[in-house]
Image (cartoon, helix red, strand yellow):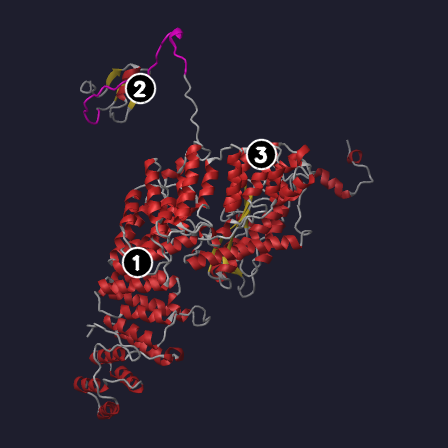
Amino acid sequence: MAAAIRKHSKVILSRAKFIEQNLRHFTVGQSLLGNTWFIYDKAKKKKDFIPVEHPIKIDKTPEAELQPIVIPDKIERSPTAILEALASTVRNDINQPMYSSIDDPYLYCNSDFLKKNNMAAKDSGRKTARMMMSMYPEYITQIWEEPLPEVWRDIVQGYVHKEPSEAALLERIAKRKVSDAIQVYEAVNPKSQLSQETIEKFLELLCVFNNQSPEIPSDVQQFIEPPSFIKDAPFPAVTWQKESLAEQVFRDLPVKTTAAYCYLIRGMATYFNKNGAMSLFREMRAANLTADVLTYNDLLSVASLDLETMEEVILEIETLLKDMAASNVKPNVQTFNSVLFSCNRVSRWSGCKKFALSVMSEMKALELEPTLATYLQMLKIFYDIKDKSPKTKNADLFLDILNNMESKEYQLTCENDLLFFRMAMRVITTHLPDAKIALRLHTIFKTGKNSDLVGHRQLQFTYYLDLISLIAQLEHTDVVMNLYQSVCPFIFYPTSDIYLMILENISLYNTFQYIPVIYTDIQRGNYFVDKNFALTFFKTLAQHKHEPTLQGQLCDIVQSLLAVWKLKQEKMHQLPAIDGDVIGEMIIIHLNNDDHVKACELFELYKHTRSLRKTSPSALSLSKLAKKLISVPDYNAAKNVMTTMLALDYEGIPDLVETCLDLLALPEEERMYLEGLARSAPSKTISESTSSSSESSSSDSDSD
Amino acid sequence: MSVSQIFPKSLPVSSFFLAFRGISTTSSVCKNRKCGVPKVTPFRTHPLTYEEAQPPSKIYVTKGWLSWNTSNLYEEKRHAETTFEDLIIRKFMFGTWHGILASEVVIKRRHNMIVLAFLASMEHALQRQVYFLQGYTEELLTNWFKCPVKVELSAVSSKNDVIFKKI
């Protein structure tokens, strides 16, 4: 067919052929009249014709044969299913500024302290605004007489049902207003005006919130304050209100249903009133009522309270579990978590660990998948982080847990899940200091969305603090910096101690190429305001002479910090702690770069700035500078340096004078001056290993 | 039909011109447009931001509007209300962010939300002060106007950074 199409030929195509021919590469100059093609040029390239099925098929089926259109059933999806599907198509860089911070480089919150501080300031602003509104309500009123949005209606206009009634009570229950609901309940006659169902709902409200209005913290407040660990206390105080309204409401109930019993037992157990909960449970069982699994779980979580031996604890727990089995109540993961939680309180008692293992095997037998909270309780029972004894713990159980968790993604099931990763990392640093285990845990942490389960800001900070402090001591710099660059500076901002560890690591493995990477973050964190930190940092930089590019970068770092120091001289706010010691190290860094001009400038800066003369540059740095200046030669500058050395009572001047007299042709007057210097100075030669007048540290400098 | 038939003698003369005013053949005064153009100082020392430097005639040519809303579109409501609220917001922002504001406040309305965008000078402000004012402004204006108000600011190191030219 293709071969038959020639220039100026006329081709008549059917509709189907026309569509087929569209697949071919004709050159320009085609015109179509009806189904007739006039080809003005040849096809560009001969191609084998591949017949394709007609894409548009008009099926001329008689109406009788038409199949009915079957609309598929609606698939039930969550309201956020489409958003989740869309979110799964993109992936953001998690190492980015905190979402709640202002999106501006000046206002990013890097360190944990800044995150907390700035969010506290924001919360403080909100509180101030609320206070202003309560102080001057006449100024801040509704401006326009237009109907308010629904959310504002409650705040401004109050409840819909203002008079005490069942509807009013239900309205307050729905809005979780405990004290208002109590007022309405006391104003109505429960027996005549309220139904059994409404009273049960009211009872549930009282039991959940312990008969008092809850203090609901704002989102910012939750971010600032660490989570409460009251529930983890081994012997928590009973916080359930004695002879409370909930108990009275329960007593006044016309019919004591299973739900009513369950609400009250759960309330008592949650607020650690074990005796009350257990006696009510026995009363419930005597009335031949069966508790639900949630009630059993709460009872199991307080089972170990007020008992003296492990045997009693085991007996109590087993009694409840057997009762569950007798009542045909199926346990869930939370049931076993509650048992382990109960065991955790008595984890130091003999027999506890054995019982915990038997619980885990029972859980396995029931084919229940452990959650993070389960593993958390196991870690707490077997690896007590408060146990400071030097005895090494067995890592087998921990490794088994890691093996089970490998490449699994976990969901949030209860608030204890949020504590697992932080606790596991703390266990590693306390009992199993092994970088490989820590990195394995971190790999699990990075699987899927597990990193969301670290929970609170403070837990995230302590997790990374433990991880990086362990890795920085035990692993190669490449591993450390790989981790560092994945989380710094926005997810985790290291403390100055961590930076000192990283500097030690860099010095140990001679990986100074990472110095420019960490310098920016150190500078952003204003860690140079600490004198010891600044000195250690520049001492590390001055240790060796590096290849020219890297050495140039190190010199740039010096100049950059000096520029910041000069800029902040006026305000004296967050001024880098530069003094004579640090200047000495900076001189060595420039000399390592064969840049005696910058080194001389630094020396002049030291000479002419009073604030820098609190401490003196090391003898080694001045000696190196003098040698370099003699070799350049720059006699006047060298003479200045040697005079300063004499004023500082440094050794090694005679050697320098001798070199100077040998190499330079000086007038007699100058020679006599130098000889006078040599006679006045101590004669001992400065060794390469002596680095500072105040502190001596080893130096492998090979710059000269 | 004479003029006296249309207008009785009791009416003022100005009403005559009002009724017959058609195309003006005199030169345009343009006083409303002129008042938006700042005057040049003798030694050209008055600094202007980019927004101030562009005359009103350049709106939508080289600069945008400071209030973004749909109140003035056909059959939309709340023309006066929106303008008045914007006035309150500008007064409030000028007083609350005193010494920090480095530009005019751009007020954007999207659905029921008001977004305040502006430049903040960090010359005399600490980070935590800005966060405090952000929380304060959002909470107060939200409760006042009964709709969510968000502050979306950008920081500049100094007010000198926003000087476009001096006149």
SS at badge 2: loop
Q: Are marks 2 and 1 on the same chain?
A: yes
Residue under numbered circle 3? A256
Chain of the residue displaying label 2:
A
Q: Callout 3, which amino acid?
A: Lys
As drawn, A606 above or below A287: below
Which of the 4 image quarters holds residue A301? Answer: top left
Density class for disc 2 (Cα within 10 Å; few <14, some 14-19, many ≥20) is: few
As drawn, A43 above or below A346: above
Residue A581 rendering spot, x and y as whole percentages: 32, 76
Residue A648 visible in rendering? yes
Q: Callout 2, which amino acid?
A: Pro
- Of A135 and A149, nearer the camera is A135
Residue under numbered circle 2? A55
Residue A429 colored in magenta in the image: no
In the displayed structure image, the side of residue A650 where residue B49 appears, left or right: right
